[in-house]
Image (cartoon, rainbow, N blue to C red):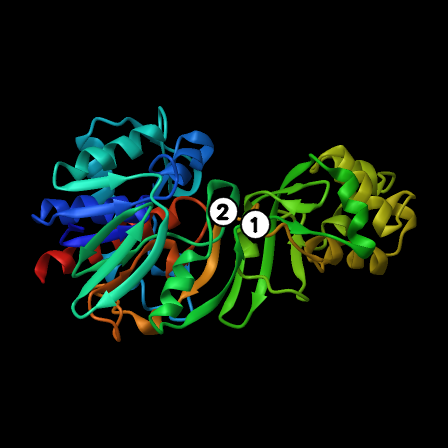
Amino acid sequence: MEHYDAIILGAGAAGLMCAAQAGKRGLRVVVLEKADKPGKKILISGGGRCNFTNVDAGPANYLSDNPHFAKSALARYTPQDFIELVNAHGIAWHEKTLGQLFCDGSAKQIVQMLLDECGESVDVLCDAFVSAVVKDGDAFAVSASGQNFTAPRLVIASGGPSIPKMGATGFAYDLARQFGLKVVEPRPALVPLTLGGEDVLFRELSGVSAPVTARAGNGKRKASFDEAALFTHKGLSGPAILQISSYWHPGEEVGITFLPQADVDWLLELKRDRPRAGLKSALREHLPDRLADALAERLGIDTELGNISDKTLRAAGQKLADWRFTPSGTEGFAKAEVTIGGISTNELSSKTMEAKSVPGLYVIGEAVDVTGWLGGYNFQWAWASGVACAEALGHE
């Protein structure tokens, strides 16, 4: 039986960050990871360059049943704090659009940085399949791949079920339920949407991409994003669609503005200036040819603009400004970058990440019902929640 100050389940972004910070506070920590190496989701992120944070990350960029929960941790460990850590390890990085930061080199540098930060007081054990977790008095006992570990504190950092090919499962939720913690129904987020019915026409545009404004959601969970949409053989993807997928629920519509910079009456102005122009050629000036042709065909306007009534052109402009789709679904957890939902924030302290009803049990990272936008926000939550937990571990 190996005795530690804390056992962390999962060597992902949150787990490694928590272990490193706890180790610096003098705690002896073991991280149990069932994969054959640590940080596997970090390694594939950002096309292998790891979009490790976003300079604009703040509470407004996260979804949760309790939108206030993430405020404490995010305020105490900011993107600048992580940037300083990256700089201290000599890792070169660059900023892409919308505040997204990437390594110049490889995501391997971030994983190695975290492992280096862990130091000698942290043991990271891979190929460790957890078979049992029990609480015996003030201690937790964990059995994993023939070894037994005990500690007064246990941290769930095993993520959600997104990207199962990387070994992701709902293990965190099962463990939470074992200890009586409620789980907000998990569903895929940052995921491509599928199309059926009349919208199948757009599948024929597979590979075509265009800048759009995409909208989804109702009430408090309502959002719009100005980024690219990509048509696929199954439906819609691209940054704008991945973003709104977190706000979309089955049966709801998605709104797309195909010409975000255009006035809704631009076709009327074009009719006055160039009455002999056709809709297809007009759209081709702003959109990829295949998309322009498909939209013109759908609108049923195949003659010169001068021969079309203002009412018809105004209606066409309004349709292009708010084209409605009703997705048939999503591509599921297999293609989802993250999970929305998870262990309820009502069960946890926003300051320490400790379960209110189970002293010594903590939950961090994607396992918690806190989900960020696309673009480095989920990594920032992993870092911030990991640090918040480590501070609490070190103070007990």
Give x and y (percent) for residue 103: 34, 30
Is 176 above or below relative to 170?
below
The amino acid beneath tag 1 is: Val
The amino acid beneath tag 2 is: Glu
Give x and y (percent) for residue 126: 32, 39
Residue 245, disc: none
Q: Nearer the viewer, residue 170 or 87?
A: 170
Give x and y (percent) for residue 245: 57, 55
Would you say residue 77 is visible in this rendering? no
Tell me which numbered mark, 1 or 2, is placed earlier along the sequence: 1
Quadrant holding the C terminus: bottom left
Give x and y (percent) for residue 394: 11, 56
Residue at 44% over, 34% down:
44
Label 1: few (<14), some (14–19) or many (≥20) C-alpha neighbours in 10 Å: many
Q: Secondary structure at mark 1?
A: loop
User: Within the image, what quadrant is residue 35 found in?
Assistant: top left
Q: Secondary structure at mark 2?
A: loop
**Label 1, label 2: how many angstroms apart (C-alpha)?**
6 Å
Q: Which residue is denoted by mark 1 in the rendering?
A: 191
Residue at 7% over, 48% down:
26
Q: In screen coordinates, is 245 left or right of 341? A: right
Q: Which residue is denoted by mark 2 in the rendering?
A: 337
Residues under numbered marks 1 and 2 in contact, where contact means CB atoms less than 8 Å apart: yes
Q: In screen coordinates, is 364 left or right of 271? A: left
Q: In screen coordinates, is 260 left or right of 373? A: right
User: Within the image, what quadrant is residue 322 found in?
Assistant: bottom right
Q: In screen coordinates, is 200 left or right of 70? A: right
